[in-house]
């Protein structure tokens, strides 16, 4: 009778260990799946950010090209555009030192 009780205890302990092992495996799988999902989310975010940057660069490049083309057309129809741009960018301060006989920048003395 004592031997049967001992066998039952051993069987219960073995069953408990088996269940505990299954729980451990399930937890490990859940952690692995979480890490995998996070890595996939990070990879997707990186890919999307790269695509967005590439798209933004393309749009910016196209806008710059259109602006350059518009300036070229404007310059073709009005050669004084260069003078206008110079005047717009000038801060209003003449150089403090000048070489004798040199031209005064942006000032037409006629």
Image: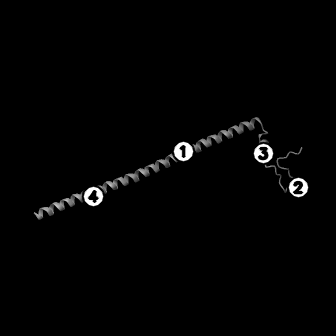
Q: Which of marks 2 and 4 is nearer the N terminus?
A: 4
Please say if the residues under marks 3 and 4 sit with CB atoms less than 8 Å apart: no
Name the residue beneath numbered marker 4.
20
| Residue 75 on image: x %, y % | 75, 38
Characterize the local packing of mark 1: few (<14), some (14-19) or many (20 or more) Cα atoms within 10 angstroms: few
> Which residue sits furthest right?
110
Q: Is label 3 or label 4 in front?
A: 4
Q: Which of marks 1 and 4 is nearer the N terminus?
A: 4
| Residue 57 on image: x %, y % | 59, 45
Secondary structure under tag 1 reads helix
Q: In which quarter of the image is the N terminus?
A: bottom left
In the displayed structure image, the side of residue 110 where residue 91 appears, left or right: left
Mark 3 and mark 4: Cα distance apart in space: 81 Å
Q: Earlier in the sequence, mark 2 or mark 1?
A: 1
Name the residue beneath numbered marker 1.
52
Mark 2 and mark 1: Cα distance apart in space: 55 Å
Q: Is label 1 or label 3 in front?
A: 1
Q: Is label 2 or label 1 in front?
A: 1
Secondary structure under tag 2 reads loop
Q: Earlier in the sequence, mark 2 or mark 3?
A: 3
Name the residue beneath numbered marker 2.
100
In the image, is residue 69 above or below residue 5?
above
Name the residue beneath numbered marker 3.
86
């Amino acid at each position: 009778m004592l031997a049967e009780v001992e066998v039952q205890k051993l069987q219960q302990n073995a069953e408990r260990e088996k269940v505990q092992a299954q729980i451990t495996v399930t937890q490990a799988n859940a952690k692995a799946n979480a890490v995998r999902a996070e890595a996939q989310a990070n990879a997707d975010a990186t890919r999307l950010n790269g695509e967005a940057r590439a798209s933004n660069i393309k749009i910016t490049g196209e806008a710059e090209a259109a602006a350059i083309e518009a300036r070229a057309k404007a310059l073709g129809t009005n050669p004084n555009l260069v003078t206008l741009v110079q005047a717009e960018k000038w801060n209003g301060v003449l150089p403090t030192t000048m070489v004798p006989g040199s031209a005064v920048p942006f000032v037409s003395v006629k």
